[in-house]
Amino acid sequence: MKTFNDPEAFARVKRLPPYVFTVTDRLRDEAIARGVDVVDFSMGNPDGATPDRIVERLRSAVGDPKLHRYLNPRGLPELRASVSRWWKRRHGVEVDPEREVLVTIGSKEGIGHALIAMLSEGDTVLAPAPTYPIHAFGAVLAGAESLPVAVGPGVDFFESLVAAAERAEKRPKGLVVNFPANPTAAVGTQELFEKIVRFAEARDMFIVSDLAYCDIVFDGPKAPSMLAVPGARDRTLEFMSLSKSYNMPGWRVGFCAGNPALVAAAARVKSYLDYGLFGAVQAAAMTALDECDDEVVKIREKYRVRRDALVRHFGAAGWQVPAPAASMFAWAPIPEPFRQLGSLEFCKRLIDEAGVAVAPGIGFGPAGEGSVRIALIVDEPRVQLAAERIEKFLKKGPGGR
């Protein structure tokens, strides 16, 4: 009889590296257990309360027994209609709520299921690097492989895309894009999106576009939608999440829209794996999308104020952090004297010696090495406290003297 004592005995699991953030999470939790008041910038976990109107809608809906049953795994028709209105209002894009919209359990789940639906063993997909793990490892879950496309400060993403496609031994089946980007906060333009669509058309690729941070833009024009590009609808699934725009990370509400066949493919996979969200949560999501545009403005402004505070205070402490134009993250090079440590060791030391937690760049793939991600999830007094500690930490140097 076999004894199962190693999760990596399974080939697909073996291809999924252990989440590097569990290392820094453990160190952070151990420091807190010792009584350290850790200033935690490590996770993109919004700290604000969900707007009252949304919570009240949940309270009123939760007593409706019709919403206690299994529901359409594509999402309630009323929520899909709200999604359709959101897309038209926000991006000027008309989508059919019956054929072109799918409600997901957050955008991460949706992207993962879509890639499982559209990829086969041995396929490849182009994905940004560094990036949020599901963009690259969704392909691995499907038995496929992701090919890295460089993104970030000073990088021409389209040039990277062309170069990656030319290096590929076989034609990639599709590509994943994420603008504004996690973790690098890179922003995309309408011109870039048009080039991406023409690129995909010429190579008969699908496009998965992650718009999770499209509402969190501080500088420059609003974030474009891939579906607004002529021809994109023929090959695109575009995902959005309520987590950041509406302070709803724990509610796990997302959605996608796009090509009806791609929506149907993702929906078929989902129908084997889940029955969608609790109906009362879907009802609350309708209120968010239909009635809470003003709350999105407030939330964006809160992140802008935090961004400015972080750049100002960390800069005064001796760590020059580039100001992100969008997203809820700053992507910061490790201070030069500490760069030799690597991002994981730097983050460990920062927790142990300064009581400040950030996310190591290596957690977003090898291309993230040399930088860290700082989430804008604490207010200015805590940012200032972190900066005071960081100043002392930097002055001691990598030797800890």
Image: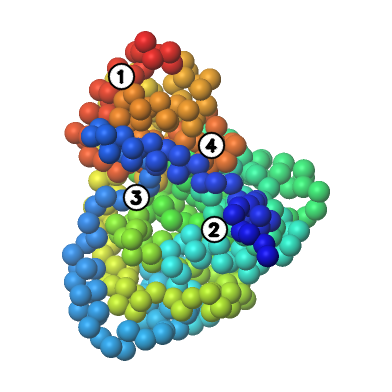
Disc on the earlier residue, 1 or 2: 2
Residue that label 2 marks: 209
The residue lying toward the viewer, choosing from 215 and 360, is 360
Q: Amino acid at mark 3?
A: Asn
Q: Quick one: SS at disc 1?
A: helix
Tell me: residue 201, above or below residue 136: below
Q: Amino acid at mark 2?
A: Ser
CA gap between label 1 and label 4 equals 24 Å
Residue that label 4 marks: 362
Q: Provide residue 297's location: percent of width, then percent of height.
A: 27, 54
Residue at the (66%, 67%) spot, across then down: 118
Residue 206 showing in the rendered view: no
User: What label does residue 391 carry, if any?
Assistant: 1
CA gap between label 4 and label 3 equals 19 Å
Residue that label 3 marks: 45
Q: Quick one: SS at disc 2?
A: strand
Q: Quick one: SS at disc 4?
A: helix
CA gap between label 1 and label 2 equals 39 Å
Q: Amino acid at mark 1?
A: Glu
Disc on the earlier residue, 1 or 3: 3
- The answer to whether the residues at label 1 and label 4 have Cβ atoms under 8 Å apart is no
Q: Provide residue 63's location: percent of width, then percent of height.
A: 22, 83
